[in-house]
Image (cartoon, grey):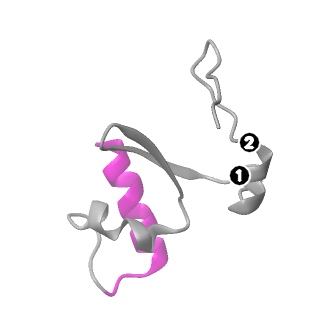
Amino acid sequence: MIITSSEKGRIVIPATIRKQLNIEAKTRLFVRVRNGEIVLTPAGDVRRLYGVLADYAVPGSTEEDEREAMYRAVAQ
C-alpha cells in the first residue's frame, strides 16, 4: 500500500490498518527509524520497545515508568 505525505509532512494511516491495530483517534504513537524504514508503535506498548529503551528503563519498573522513559528517549 502506498500513501502520500501532505505538504506539511503529515501522513494518514489507512483505515484498514488502523482497525487491524486498534488505533483510534488520539492514540499516541512512538516513531523511530530502523534500517531506513519508519516504524510506528503504539506508545502504550512500551514493553515491545525495551531494547530501544534499555538505557532508560529499569527492569521491574511499572508501565508508567517505562512510558516516561520512552518520552525521555524520544526527547534526546
Viewer-closest of 40 and 26: 40
Q: Secondary structure at mark 2?
A: loop
Residue at x 33%, y 70% (from the top left corner) = 50
> Relative to 13, does residue 61 appear above or below in the rendering?
below
Q: Can you say which quadrant of the picture contains the N terminus?
A: top right
- Classify the position of the C terminus by image quarter: top left
In the rendering, which numbered label is found on residue 14? 2
Magenta stretch containing residue 71, yes or no?
yes
Mark 2 residue type: Pro
Give the Cα separation between the discs numbered 1 and 2: 5 Å
Q: Count the marks: how many?
A: 2
Q: What percent of the width, then of the height, locates residue 56?
A: 26, 64
Q: Indicate whether residue 32 is drawn in magenta.
A: no
Q: Nearer the viewer, residue 1 or 73?
A: 1
Q: Residues within 10 Å of mark 2 (few under 14, many from 20)?
A: few
Q: Quadrant of residue 75?
A: top left
Q: Please give the range of residues in magenta.
A: 60-76
Q: Residue at x 71, y 57 (%)?
A: 23
On the question of residue 22 being in view, the answer is no
Circle 1 Cα neighbour tier, 10 Å, few/some/many (<14 / 14–19 / ≥20): few
Q: Secondary structure at mark 1?
A: helix
Residue at horizontal 36 percent and vertical 82 percent from the top: 61
**Which x, y percent locates residue 6?**
65, 18
Query: Does residue 32 appear in this view?
Result: yes
Q: Which residue is mark 1?
A: 17
> Residue 27 sits in which quadrant?
bottom right
